[in-house]
Image: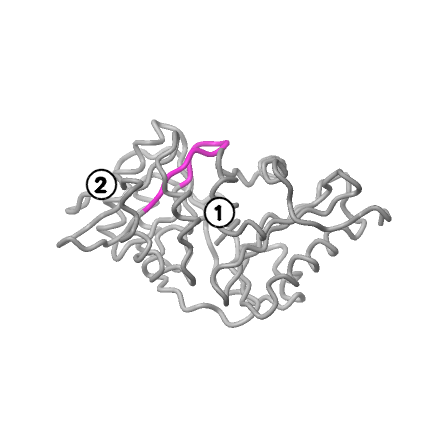
Amino acid sequence: MNSEFAVRSMRPGELELVLEWARQEGWNPGLDDSLAFLEADPSGFFVGAIGEVPVGSISVVKYGDSFAFLGLYIVHPDFRGKGYGKAIWEAAIATAEGRTIGLDGVAAQQENYRRAGFEPAYTTLRYGGVPTTLPASPLVAQPVLDSRLEGLLRYDSAVFPQPREAFLAAWCTGRKGRRTAVVRKNHKIRGYGTIRRCYEGYKIGPLFANDADSAAALLAELIPEAKGAPVFIDIPAEHREAIALAEGLGLQPAFETVRMYRGPAPAIPMKHVFGVTTLELG
């Protein structure tokens, strides 16, 4: 290992570099993910660098005082097999000591994560393709106004393990290529979702809803934003209603990841998770 190697917090512009690495790895991040990612936890993003040159990355984003999520674990191909990845991992993991840590990893890495103390919780399937139809629903979803996020934040905190107000305020704002919708019944929120432009097509996430009718209404509102481009949704494999909705759109499974936790797994109402927010931040 080069004597000039050190692990440090990311500097301005380096998260964009790492997201470009993620694109090259085929992870297909959103075009403007960096803004919301940094709002989630500005101290949660790290690079391993030789002098001024980043050679690897990781994020360990802290939510509240008991939960963190690990992602963006990448070593540039030119620097693999030299111990840099292990050093980056150990330095970043230490910043979340005492918290449950989650990650979404490819199945091939599951044993490596087990050795690091992570245990599998469930499988996530990415469904993708060009939707051939819009789902029918007796409910109607509406776009979310940037100034009216209070109810959405409360709804999200009942599904996600910890509150994440700053992240959602950035994630759900109506920038170009991004739309958030909410569905209500009797003036109560029954779900919400966001679609965003990615390097390839669009991703929908989160897609949180009380039931299939609510999720269908959200999809019917969000999918037109893609304007005929491919759409991708990361769905817990055990959620049969969510899988049926994706297949009804004409989407097909593309690949899978395994959600794993080190520490007690958070109590998540999985029946409400029709689509994961993002594999990088949970």
Which secondary structure lies at badge 2? Answer: strand
Q: Main secondary structure of the magenta part?
A: strand
Residue at label 2?
Answer: 142
> Which residue occupies the foreground of this view, 149 or 277?
149
Residue 184 x/y as whole percent: 19, 50
Left or right of 187, for residue 197: right
Cα separation between marks 1 and 2: 25 Å
Residue drawn at point x = 35 percent, y = 49 percent: 207
Residue at label 1?
Answer: 39
> Which residue occupies the foreground of this view, 95 or 259?
95
Residue 15 x/y as whole percent: 60, 40
**In the rendered image, the vertical position of residue 281 relative to residue 262, given as above or below:** above
Residue drawn at point x = 41 percent, y = 33 percent: 230
Image depth: mark 1 or mark 2 in front: 1
The stretch drawn in magenta includes residue 39: no
Number of marks in picture: 2
Left or right of 187, for residue 221: right
Give the magenta range: 193-203
Q: Amino acid at mark 2?
A: Gln
Residue 124 x/y as whole percent: 46, 54
Residue drawn at point x = 45 percent, y = 46 percent: 126
Residue 271 x/y as whole percent: 32, 61
Which secondary structure lies at badge 1? Answer: helix
Give the quarter of the image for residue 159.
Answer: bottom left
The residue carrying pointer 2 sits among few (fewer than 14), some (14 to 19) or many (20 or more) residues within 10 Å by Cα, namely: some
